[in-house]
Amino acid sequence: MKKLDKRLFRMIKNTKGQFIAVLAIIITGIFVFTAVNNSAKNLNDSINDYYIETNFADIFVKGSSLPEKLEKQLPGTNDIIDAEARIVFDTKFITDDKDENVNVRVISVDKYENKINKLFMKTGKRILDEKDAILIEQFAVARNINVGDEIKIKINGRQTSFNVSGIATSSEYAYMMENEQTMLPNPENFGVIYLEEDYLRKVYSSRGNFNEILLSVNDDDNIEKIADQLEDNLDEYGVSRVIKKSDQLSNNMLSQEISGLEMMSQSIPVVFLAFAGIMLASMLSRIVKKDRTSIGVLKALGFTDGEIVVHYLKYAAIVGITGGLTGSIFGTALSGVMTSYYLVFFSIPMLTVKVYYYRILISVVLSLLFCIISGFLGVRGIVRINPAESMKPESPKKGKRLLVENIKFFWNHIPFSWKMVIRNIFREKKKFVFIGAAVAITCGMMIMTIWMIDIIDVMFNRHYSEFSKVQYNISFDSFKDESVLSEFAEAVKVDDMEGRIELPFEIENGRYSKIVNVIGLNEDTVFYGFRDMKNNKVQVPSQGILLSSNLANSLNANVGDVILLNNFVSDDEAFVTVKGIINQTLGINGYMSIDYLNEQFLDKRIINGVYINSDEDVPNKLDDMKNINVQSQNDMKLAFEEFTAVTAMSMGFMVVFSGLLGFVIVYSMTLMSINERTLEFSSLRVMGFSKKEIFNMLIRENMIMTVIGIISGIPVGLWLVKYLGDAFTTDIYTMKEPVNPKSIFISIILTIIFIILAQLMTYAKIHKLDFMQALKNRIS
Amino acid sequence: MNEIVLKVENLSKNYQMGEVTVKALEDVSLDAVKGEFIVILGPSGSGKSTLLNIIGGMDTPTSGNVYFNDEHITNMSDKDLTLYRRNKIGFVFQFYNLMATLTAKENVELAAELCENAIDIDEVMESVGLGGRKDHFPSQMSGGEQQRVAIARAVAKNPQILLCDEPTGALDFETGIQILKVLKDVNEIYKNTVIVITHNASIAQMADKVIKMRSGKITDISINESPIPAERIEW
Ligand SMILES: Nc1ncnc2c1ncn2[C@@H]1O[C@H](COP(=O)(O)OP(=O)(O)O)[C@@H](O)[C@H]1O
Ligand SMILES: [Mg+2]
């Protein structure tokens, strides 16, 4: 080994505390980057493979009576390649447990194979006979149903048995939610069953017509245009919605998850790498400064500037390669864990944990480049060192009075030890700003994490206890007269009951438009507690509409604006005034008085669902009613609780990562201080200071910066919360919840714990240091 | 046989300190012959280091020329100066300036690795009297021992000129004499030109040529026909 390299390794050994510290930050950054980015790529690649393999539909057309002939007519027009009609309806799944409420979606498929949204068989056979059913895997697993079992569902009000002939997954239900309102998959209580098409056409009363058509088109970029045209062209068949691939529920959830991951992989690692970069640069520039004479000697010996720069850059390169390699290997391992965590929520048969070797390489190269660039910023001073000058002792810096010293009242009243602390801080301004910034970021990230933990809870609890007080939401297959309510009152002992309308509308405001469910309610409804953004109670207006804040946002609508509502079913349009914007944490909706909605778009006194609150087992009591679907709020809450248990783990990771940043930087910067100031400390020791007193001085310096860091960390945290809230606010979640003081308090405590840990570590180091030795050998 | 290896012509060096111009060197000229042992004498601040640094290619003059054999040093690019230092020059400094994290031997190897015609390291270490302490770190050695390592480091490259800036300045009398003896031994074994800076006049007794400086100027150059061995110097 070259002697210069030997010197390098001894240099690393002598500064191993700092070396490990900066390495830890790089590793964390690369680790998060690889883990999250790999997961996103895993998810993205496998879902795309899955879509290709199963020929995922580009457009979903829903209507009341779509004739079979469309299957032949549509292909060839409008860039449409293929069309496949099917019957889809929700019904009740009969279980042995009478207290259970299980809904299934029945979908017709071809006896042998369908062209679009093909089933991906897991077990059993694809060929379907009349009395056969293929079950979606998530449901079969959750309910422990196997091939050969018999299942019962209600068709046309009658219990009908089927033999489970196969179990499959479907790209359409990779994320299997019943509808937008359910928020989470709940495979025990909702599943999909595929039945043979000809059989369903006979038994499902629709005069042989279908109610959905799947389309695949030539050009993905044209989907939007084709969808618009279809909406107009297929009017006569009672088209209620034309859903583009990008809006399809499961696909939409997946893309949001993927883009969320991508955002995360681009933000958190940047923070870590930025800190690592600054640290590396300042570490190296300090090393270079300390080595000034040695560098002069090397130059005098005939080493070129380039050789010397490379010598020091190797330090950065070793950090980069080790950090990149370790980080990306651990990251790849974690992405395996993350991917299997996604498998809990997403059913993607191709989703396997892949090791992307070239990505490890990319991470290493990235980390290497990054370290070399930061390293270069630190060592570029080498070029300026003049060998002749470097042999002379550096002229001492001029002592300068600090600004605070002029504030006589303050300065004269603080003890000497504090004066020294303040002088030291000002002497090394940059270093302390850096420590302060690290503490601020740590505290900020803590606030963000604690807020995340809080908000998930708040979102669901607020939604299900304060916002929506619906215990059972019963949907009808079609519109009914209000008078059916009496049937429900007879069947169930209700505490509260109201008829409601829930209907998709296309809402337009100028050039903004959005398709959402609008809900028609009694003006004095007891099932909702609406509040505006200032937390004032809001009543359902007798005329006009209330918008959830995310809807108002995406329509760019304000109170008082007049917006256009377009109903697919009746194809009626009407202008409606926005009467209020309400705070709704889950889902995206408009709310109107049911009378006003009926008057504008439908007929008087009709409803397509009922809200019921009752202590009785409602699904069981309504067992005999035909063509209804009962949703229980309690089931959704339970599904949510499972979900939070899993997220708690990833939040735990975040707390550790954030803490690590503060810990590592405070630790390594203090170490740097100790190394640089051994002479000064030695003199203090000679004067009679104890190790403890010296340590106290260091602690005080860091304490001041910690306090400043924490104070400035609070706005950083609030900003992060706002940024994250905006980024994660989707049609499904609205994360506009202020941080509560308790979260801030917890974050500060956590930050302080990590800083104290770092201090204790440096104390151990100080204890080992032999200051006297430092005085004895003064060699460069 | 009086082959001139180094020629300095009308060398001047000015430092601009705000309004004032410090003339560190003023019109200095001298020659050095191969194998010559030269002592430059002068009080502190007289320009000795400045002269040595320019000769060694570590600094550039304001005007004047330095020739090493036929090479025009003062016209060289930074890159060529580095090569010149690497292959032709050996430096010994007052404060030894060893690499603290390398052992004695490694410090010498560091320099030897630089050039093609390096001398065998063990031999050099032997000739400076360091046979037994090769694996010690600088912090485990006395000042005199460290200076021996520094000399070995400079000699190992087999330079044609060995430049020593107050090599005994940080040492006590006894040790200083030993170091001077080492320098003289090296000079005799390897036949390189040795230039030693000092402000101690008695060292001049061992030189082949004595150059006296004052206020940036050379005041006298004298040839010493009968130099005495280092161990007989007294002051
Ligand atoms: N970098 C510099 N800037 C300004 N003046 C300098 C510098 N280096 C040397 N000098 C001045 O040049 C003169 C000669 O210095 P130097 O060659 O170091 O003297 P010596 O080695 O004989 O003690 C001194 O007056 C010194 O102050
Ligand atoms: Mg000098």
Image (cartoon, coloured by chain):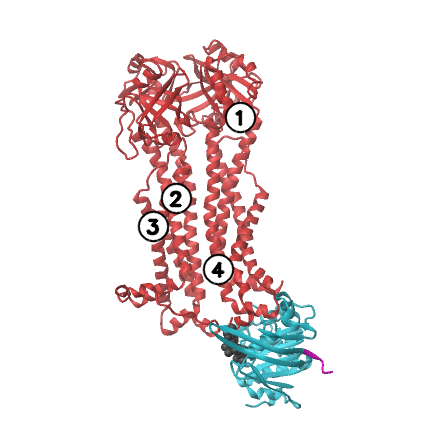
Chain colours: A red, B cyan
Quarter placement of the C terminus of chain B: bottom right
Whether marks 2 and 4 lie on the same chain: yes
Q: CA distance from mark 2 to mark 4?
A: 29 Å
Q: Say the numbered circle drawn on residue A749.
A: 3
Q: Is mark 3 within 8 Å of ligand 1?
A: no
Q: Which residue matches tag 1?
A: A222
Q: Is residue B133 visible?
A: no
Q: Which residue matches tag 4?
A: A283
Q: Chain of mark 2?
A: A
Q: Is residue A292 left or right of residue A492?
A: right
The x and y percentages for residue A741 are 30, 44
Of label 3 and label 1, which has the lower sequence position? 1
Above or below residue A620? Residue A51 is: below
Q: Is residue A230 left or right of residue B153?
A: left
Of label 1 and label 2, which has the lower sequence position? 1
Q: Nearer the viewer, residue A471 or A82?
A: A82
Of label 3 and label 2, which has the lower sequence position? 2
Q: CA distance from mark 3 to mark 2?
A: 19 Å
Circle 1: is it few (<14), some (14-19), or many (20+) Cα within 10 Å?
few
